[in-house]
Image (tube, rainbow, N blue to C red):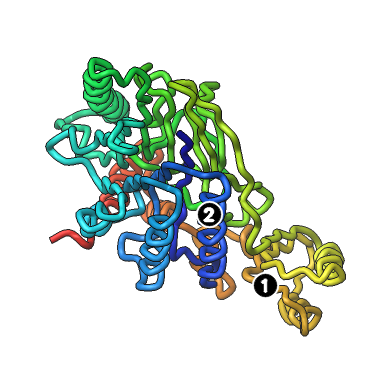
Amino acid sequence: MKLLHTSDWHLGRTLYGKKRYDEFIGFLDWLVETITKEQIDILLIAGDIFDTSTPSNRAQALYYQFLCKVSTSCCRHVVVIGGNHDSPSFLNAPKELLKALNVHVVGAITDNLEDEVIILHQNDEPEAIICAIPYLRDKDIRKVEAGESIDDKNTKLIEGVKSHYQAVCAIAEQKQKALKKLGFNHTPIIAMGHLFAAGGKTVTGDGVRELYVGSLAHVRGNIFPDCIDYLALGHLHVPQIVGGAEHIRYSGSPIPMGYGEAKQTKKVLTVTFNKNSPTITEINIPCFQPLARIVGSFDQIIGQVKQLKDHDSNAWLEIEYTGCDAIGSLRETLEELLIATKIEIRRIKNKQVMDRVMNMITEDETLDDINENDVFIRCLDENEIPANERDDLMACYHEIIQDINEQDKNAQ
């Protein structure tokens, strides 16, 4: 049995307003070809299929067209779990219909843990037990108590995640034992999840949201039950092994979600089972749209852009000017230089502007230069809130932002 692990497609995501459908189409077409070439039996998609809870019609079309193509390939089963960017009700809406294509969807947890345990069959014989555990929202795993501290909340969140994985995997073990009694001695337990593992690598600008209030709510690899033969994780965009455990992996995102990921080699993972022992192989994903970040003085920027031009590049550029002189014509100069090329400038940052006083909004500053935390900090500064009151206010603010991010706009 051979499976392929991927995650964090973020279909519909843009880059400074630029639609990226050509990249998504390129990746999905490549993935269908790879499934056939590698003779994949099971495809695991570990959350964040879409970039928002209300994906565009085109993003939806890409998802369903892909599933239809895979259903006619050698791949016998597809398992999809919801991520923190996904709408659970949107993912779950067609789940009964998708079952006809052997696509199994778990958008969110239910009152019945059995819903997260899926036995996959080949020719009426069990080949894998999947613990399809979606993104666990705060309200799913923690009871709010008056007067609890941030540390108390983090501890309860981590314990809640641990308890949920233990409970689901206990059901899987029971099913595995029952199958052994029927003569099926080597049915692997494969788990899926969408979470932030402690020590996980991220990069600036990747769009990875904090899942819970406070950075301490990152789970350690040792919370996962020993019965798991392979754990396919999503949420972090950098492909990586968790806590030195070879069988616990993030596949990472298939395309760079921001310029911080521009130099990464993107991957999918294949896992081949010989009885219960997994052999894991990384497959590099082609780059469908090069991104390049150029930082420096005026002369350095011009020089690097000319090099890209000479190599007939089609890169999308993010440029950060760090020189001391005020340059008012940088964009015009660059656009003139790039006439009749395939290179596009997606963003120009001027460090002189960025270094101005944070609470002064200038005509050159845009919302691309700040985030929601910056806005709130400016509000605190403007109202002269003392430092000893800020931690609690920031914690409350983060809870509000989290609630907004987790609202399921597609639910009734």
- Determine the residue positioned at 37% across, 20% down: 186
Task: Choose between 55 and 269: the one closer to the eye.
Answer: 269
Return the residue at label 1: 345
Q: Is 327 on the left or on the right of 239, as rendered?
A: right
Residue 254 horizontal/vertical position (percent) = 54, 52
What's under tag 1, amino acid-wise? Ile
Element on which disc 1 rests: strand
What's under tag 2, amino acid-wise? Leu
Looking at the image, residue 279 lies above or below residue 76: above
- Determine the residue positioned at 29% across, 27% down: 165
Residue 231 horizontal/vertical position (percent) = 42, 30
Quadrant housing the N terminus? top left
* Numbered tag placed on residue 31 in the rendering: 2
- Determine the residue positioned at 44% across, 42% down: 41
Q: From where the camera sits, is residue 152 visible?
A: no
Which corner quadrant of the image does residue 210 belong to? top left
Residue 166 horizontal/vertical position (percent) = 27, 22
Task: Choose between 20 and 261: the one closer to the eye.
Answer: 20
- Determine the residue positioned at 78% across, 62% down: 324
Which corner quadrant of the image does residue 94 belong to? bottom left
* Numbered tag placed on residue 243 in the rendering: none
Element on which disc 2 rests: helix
Looking at the image, residue 275 lies above or below residue 262: above
